[in-house]
Image (tube, rainbow, N blue to C red):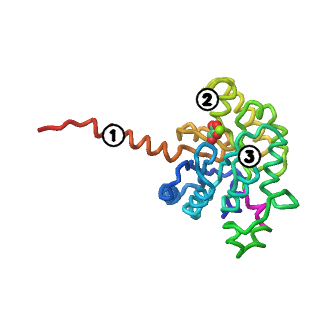
Amino acid sequence: MNAIFRRRLLERELLCGTMLTTSSVEVTEILAHLEYDWLFIDTEHSPLSPMTVRSLIQAAGKVPCLVRLADRGEVSIKNALDSGAAGIIAPQVNNAKEAKEIVSYCKYPPAGTRGVGLSRASKYGLEFSDYVSNANNSISVVLQIEHIEAVKNVHEILAVEGLDAIFIGPYDLSTSMGKPGLLRDPAVVEAINVVREACLEAKIALGYFGMDVNDVTERAVQGFSLLCSGLDLGFLTESGRKNLEGLKSTKVVL
Ligand code: 3PY
Ligand code: MG
């Protein structure tokens, strides 16, 4: 399953995802039943523990999950991959040195330095050799470019061997430019375009997150293939608000 997802990512197929930020296995199951191509489990901006992440991956079943790391550390990466994540999304990668470190933590030797342990990913050791032999080619390594420093260093980041996709973080990027959330500001548009053009030239898959599905689908025609639109709590907020508006639009007739 994870190897197929990585192949689709590398071939820059349209991959439609949404973000999980709550610990609810039921919510994960609903989104998996809807057959999203992938789920983005966010541990950077949500207090999800490694145990909870594992439960969400279990609840997602056949839907591949990419875990956004709380930090760029080795242990966060081991936890996510050992739990069976299809890959990781590393936030705030600003230069080639940071990119190389992350790739190294994701790959078993000799390609990298990932530690070996019995884990859910290897069916608790029942498929140990098979898992360890194939993991380097099955795990997706996605790095976020979301700071103006990273935009300046985009070419050196893209030259790092072993990265599979770049995921732009428009909100952090615009904030790093002193224009928080101003995604249509010409300077922000230009910064995103610099990354986009570099990835297209290097034939590296591009990812994008947006709260609004139309903003995200607009990106597909610009070459973005790893799409993530909306998040679990946002769906609840929006439908809860509309529901209440509907209720309040009526009057009691006595
Ligand atoms: C951002 O916009 O900063 C993100 O990280 C989106 O995922
Ligand atoms: Mg971000």
Q: Which mark is residue 244?
A: 1
Q: Is residue 43 magenta?
A: no
Instruction: Tell me if 243 is positioned left or right of 222 in this view.
Output: left
Q: Mark 1 is on which residue type?
A: Leu
Task: State the residue in front, 181 or 164.
Answer: 181
Q: Mark 3 is on which residue type?
A: Arg
The quarter of the picture where the C terminus appears is: top left
Task: Please tell me whether mark 1 or mark 2 is closer to you in this view.
Answer: 1
Quarter of image, res 183: top right
Instruction: Give whichever of discs 1 and 2 has the lower sequence position.
Output: 2
Question: Is disc 2 placed on a helix, strand or loop?
Answer: loop
Task: State the residue in front, 46 or 202.
Answer: 46
The residue range painted magenta reads 133-139
Vertical position of residue 194 compared to residue 71: above or below:
above
Instruction: Give whichever of discs 2 and 3 has the lower sequence position.
Output: 3
Return the x and y of residue 155 as percentages of the image width and height.
83, 37
Question: Is disc 1 placed on a helix, strand or loop?
Answer: helix
Return the x and y of residue 14 as percentages of the image width and height.
63, 50
Would you name the residue on which mark 2 appears?
Answer: 183
In the current view of this chain or complex, which residue is farthest to the left? 254
Q: Residues within 10 Å of mark 1 (few under 14, many from 20)?
A: few
Would you name the residue on which mark 3 appears?
Answer: 72
Ligand 2's quadrant: top right
Q: Mark 2 is on which residue type?
A: Leu
